[in-house]
Every structure is written in structure tokens, then in C-alpha cells.
Image (tube, helix red, strand yellow):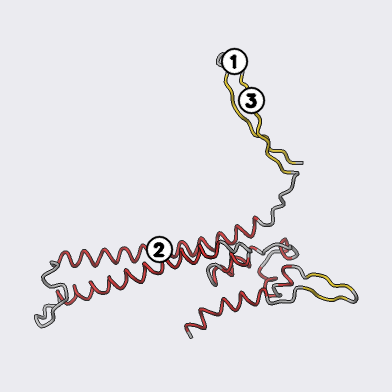
């Protein structure tokens, strides 16, 4: 069951690209639009502005990223970002697990130390005093909680980045938009040299 929940978003992502790319209409062949190519499931999720666009759909990108981190970046065809997402979230998950294991270890030792039963002996007798054992336990608990916060923040940022990246791909960048630097001379009591930038939109 656990593996099914993990692999389900991957199969969903595969379905997005598994649709037919072309359709035959009489004697002509036309390429499907992005929304048609990704199935009708995306249409209720997006505004009319993006339905007929040949670019990624922002709402679909954030939905995929929330279902499976990294899928939003793959959907946007920013493939190089996916390994960064997996490395960041994988690192956070690693520190969560490691710090939780150590926290439980010292928590059990401290519980044994303070249970009042002389027949139970913790593995740190003679190495750490009671206060030191409690301080080490709290240290690993703080590290675990901090790693969880960083992981949740990274998970949220991957969805935000996928949404913004999909939006930016809709911007039209042509030669009509240009920036031209130009030197300038300021005359006055104290002449000075400077630089200016001109943004030209035709």
C-alpha cells in the first residue's frame, strides 16, 4: 500500500505525456495543443487564458509538484531542476530520520535513568550525568524539528517555483524588447561621469 501511494504520482505524471501527439482530421494532420495533449483533467483546473496556450499550465505545474516534488519542474521541461529538488528534500529527510533515531535513543536512556527502578540500567551509565543526558536528547530533538521545518519549506518552495516558472514561460521575449546601456556626462560645479540604461518597448 505504501509503495502504491509513492508510485501513484509517478504514474499520473507518465499519463500526462502518454497522450497522442497528433490527430488526423480528414486528409490533414494537426498537432494537439498542450491542454489536449495532457487530457481533459487539466481543463477545470486552469483559467481560460491558459487553456489554448502551447506552454505549460501553471495550475497543473503546482498540482503535480504538490503530488510529487520535482514533477512540476519536469512538467515545465526544466529537467535540470529536478535533481536539485530531490537532493534538497532527500537531505532534509535524511537529517530528520537520523536525528529522530538519536533522539529516541537518548530519550529511552533518560527514561530508564529516571524511572526509579534500580534493576533497569541505561547504556550511558558512567558516561553522562542526568543533566547531560537530557541536554543531548533535547539537542537531537531540536535538530529533528528544524530539519522537518526546512523540509516543509523546501516542499512548499518547489511548488511555488514550478508555478512561477510555468507563468514565466508565457512571457513573449522578442527583439522588440531591448535594453541599451549608454554613458552620460553630468555638467555642473563638479562634473562627473555616469551610465544610464534605456528600456525600449516597440
Quarter holding residue 29:
bottom right
Lower sequence index among marks 2 and 1 = 2
**Is 200 situated above or below 50?**
above
Q: Mark 3 touching mark 1, by CB under 8 A? A: no
Graded by Cα atoms within 10 Å as few (under 14), some (14 to 19) or many (20 or more), the crowding at tag 3 reads few
Residue at the spot 68% in from the left edge and 38% down from the top edge: 199
Q: Residue furthest left?
A: 118
Q: Position of residue 104 (x, y in %)?
A: 27, 74
Q: Mark 2 touching mark 1, by CB under 8 A? A: no
SS for callout 1: loop
Q: CA distance from mark 2 to mark 1?
A: 56 Å
Q: CA distance from mark 3 to mark 1?
A: 13 Å
SS for callout 2: helix
Q: Position of residue 153 (x, y in %)?
A: 45, 61
Tell which tag, 3 or 2, sits nearer the viewer: 3
Residue at the spot 66% in from the left edge and 69% down from the top edge: 45
Q: Position of residue 51 (x, y in %)?
A: 73, 65
Nearest to the observer: residue 79 or residue 114: 79
Lower sequence index among marks 3 and 2 = 2
Nearest to the observer: residue 2 or residue 29: 29
- Give the residue at mark 3: 184
- Give the residue at mark 2: 149
Nearest to the observer: residue 195 or residue 63: 195
- Give the residue at mark 1: 188
Quarter holding residue 147:
bottom left
Amino acid at each position: 500500500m505504501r509503495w502504491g501511494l509513492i508510485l501513484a504520482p509517478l504514474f499520473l505524471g507518465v499519463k500526462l505525456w502518454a497522450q497522442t501527439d497528433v490527430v488526423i482530421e480528414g486528409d490533414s494532420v494537426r498537432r494537439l495543443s498542450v491542454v489536449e495533449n495532457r487530457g481533459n483533467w487539466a481543463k477545470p483546473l486552469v483559467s481560460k487564458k491558459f487553456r489554448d496556450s502551447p506552454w505549460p499550465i501553471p495550475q497543473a505545474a503546482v498540482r503535480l509538484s504538490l503530488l510529487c516534488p520535482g514533477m512540476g519542474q519536469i512538467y515545465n521541461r526544466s529537467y535540470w531542476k529536478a535533481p536539485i529538488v530531490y537532493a534538497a528534500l532527500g537531505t532534509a529527510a535524511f537529517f530528520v530520520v537520523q536525528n529522530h533515531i538519536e533522539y529516541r535513543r537518548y530519550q529511552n536512556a533518560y527514561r530508564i535513568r529516571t524511572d526509579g527502578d534500580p534493576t533497569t540500567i541505561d547504556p550511558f551509565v558512567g558516561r553522562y550525568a542526568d543533566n547531560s543526558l537530557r541536554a543531548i536528547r533535547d539537542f537531537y530533538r531540536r535538530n529533528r524539528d528544524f530539519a522537518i521545518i526546512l523540509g516543509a519549506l523546501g516542499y512548499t518552495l518547489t511548488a511555488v517555483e514550478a508555478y512561477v516558472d510555468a507563468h514565466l514561460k508565457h512571457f513573449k521575449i522578442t527583439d522588440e524588447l531591448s535594453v541599451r546601456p549608454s554613458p552620460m556626462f553630468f555638467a555642473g560645479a563638479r562634473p562627473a561621469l555616469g551610465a544610464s540604461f534605456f528600456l525600449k518597448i516597440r
